Image (cartoon, rainbow, N blue to C red):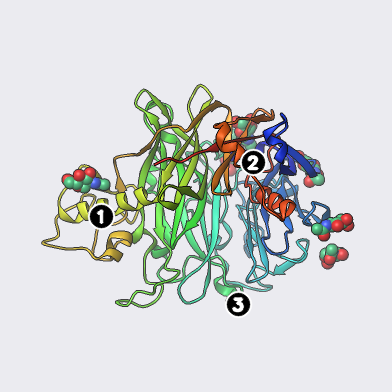
Amino acid sequence: MPPSMEIAVLLLGVLGLEMRWSASALHIQQAFASPNLTNNFVVDPVSRKVYLATVNTVYQLNGTLSVEVEKRTGPVEDNLLCHAPQLPQAPCEHPKSLTDNYNKLLKLDREQGVVVVCGSVYQGFCELRRMGNISEIAVEFPPQGEKTVFPSMLNIAANHPNASTVGLIFKSHGGNTRLLVGTTYTGAGTQFFPKNHSKEDLRFENTPEIAIRSLNIKDLSRLFTYDINPSEDNVFKIKQEVKTKNKLNFVHAFIQKTYSYIAFNNDAKMGHKESQPNSILARICLDSDSPRKTTGPESRKLTESYIQMPLQCGSTGNIYNRLLSVYPAEVHAEGGWEPYLFGVFSKADRKAALCAFKFGDIEEEIRQGRRNCSNSPSSDVQVLDSVIQGSGAVCIQKGNLVLQPEQLDCGAAHLQHPLALRRSLKALPLFEYPALSSVSVDTVHNHAVVFLGTSNGRLHKVRHTAMALRNLDFPSSRSEKRKECLLRLEFCLGTSELAAEVQFSE
Ligand SMILES: *[C@@H]1O[C@H](CO)[C@@H](O)[C@H](O)[C@H]1NC(C)=O
Ligand SMILES: *[C@@H]1O[C@H](CO)[C@@H](O)[C@H](O)[C@H]1NC(C)=O
Ligand SMILES: *[C@@H]1O[C@H](CO)[C@@H](O)[C@H](O)[C@H]1NC(C)=O
Ligand SMILES: *[C@@H]1O[C@H](CO)[C@@H](O)[C@H](O)[C@H]1NC(C)=O
Ligand SMILES: *[C@@H]1O[C@H](CO)[C@@H](O)[C@H](O)[C@H]1NC(C)=O
Ligand SMILES: *[C@@H]1O[C@H](CO)[C@@H](O)[C@H](O)[C@H]1NC(C)=O
């Protein structure tokens, strides 16, 4: 469960200057409390409106958190074993009952003026709501009278409250809007599927763990399909026979440069390898800019550029092996601005830690891995044979092939793909504390201010370095800056926040 689900209050506070002198680090300016569990929220960077989704309701709040619109999304008559009612001619013999609608995905697409809202009911079906008034459906989907609707266009988010879903919206080369979704498989044989093997598994045929779907609202017949070009090109699907060894629990998907990163845990490995990291960072090239000259637009397969590596927070004997939250941020280090990936990791005893990985190191590791895979059999890099597209599961020498920079970063059709690096990217904890659950980073006067949410509902503040804290200062338009600082916090849903300052001296 993402950490934001544990809490139900949206706080809009300020990081007060009082921080230096008093015990209260955060002052609540405005607050919004929803009766039901908060699942997701998104802040419109231009209008400052906040879209917030809870179990059974979506809200549109203004910049100071007053409710503008409120729309119920559940409970609805549903059964996990029935197709979405939006599928034409799909009667269901299983009895339906009132089912709570957990929001699984909430994404703002400013350009098309829609909010993508996907819930756990109706097989993880998505709606496109109007950005200006979230209670209105912007695009009727499937269109009235449409006969050619497939389950794959409806089964998008996880259909279970406890199964993970992450996503992001991007524009592909050619200007088409796309929705990338990563979601835990919930079909037969998983903990999420009703224990009755005689029942048909609706998630079986059409549930890739990762998919890139069309989100172009001008092309309604293709909306939400991954059949954009040959459909195999836009899906990453774990083979049925190894699903039990690959229980992916998605944490976050985000864009950095022209790459999409997806962070997840493999829960299948949690039990028996307590001391091993189970956290994985995967990268996909988005084809958003730089059209490739050799081939037409949108020709790159998702799995062609896919590469993953384990992330390790902690050192041997003291490894925090489960990723809870990540946040990419630019940090001012000695050599200038440097992008880092911050992550909160936990281990079995509820202890947690903050680690930071340099994106430069991630990129270099990927280039080395591809170079090694095309040069020789290597024990450090493998073709990921757990996915349908991962054929020829070894790296073999390809003559005297010298890969171009673009190929080192994003692969190519004639190379083995997708790839998995074996060696973890390692970082030592910057900070250790019990029950940390989320991280967000902001920069104030060249200092990275790291906000850490905790799951136990207490308000904490830690001064990591007193010297650094003294530099925390807000220039002229003080209140604006502070507000922005907290609006950008991805976990400001927390009932508790903890602010620490991290100094980078490299
Ligand atoms: C909260 O969820 C309950 C079921 O758990 C539901 O009956 C109720 O209508 C929901 N309330 C709101 C405001 O969404
Ligand atoms: C939000 O709405 C409230 C109540 O209508 C109003 O007082 C407040 O000024 C509004 N805030 C913004 C930022 O528009
Ligand atoms: C939003 O749309 C609903 C339904 O059309 C309407 O009743 C409501 O007044 C609208 N609210 C706002 C703030 O525009
Ligand atoms: C989801 O997980 C929680 C905590 O592990 C558990 O209490 C709850 O019963 C689960 N919900 C469902 C529908 O399985
Ligand atoms: C399992 O499914 C079959 C076929 O739908 C049904 O007849 C049977 O009662 C179900 N068993 C349970 C325990 O739900
Ligand atoms: C690639 O190979 C070199 C030389 O054998 C090795 O030092 C390096 O660790 C390898 N890197 C990866 C990511 O496989």
Q: Is residue 83 left or right of residue 132?
A: left
Residue 31 seen in render: no
Q: Amino acid at mark 1?
A: Arg
Location of the N terminus (image quadrant):
top right
| Secondary structure at numbered mark 3 | loop
Which residue, as the protein is rendered here, is positioned at the far left?
Answer: 399
**Residue under circle 3?**
218
**Residue under circle 1?**
370
Q: CA distance from mark 1 to mark 2?
A: 36 Å
Q: Is residue 131 left or right of residue 166?
A: right
| Secondary structure at numbered mark 1 | helix
Which quadrant of the figure has residue 232?
A: bottom left
Closer to the camera, 342 or 485?
485
Q: Is residue 151 above or below residue 449?
A: below
Location of the C terminus (image quadrant):
top left
**Residue under circle 2?**
4
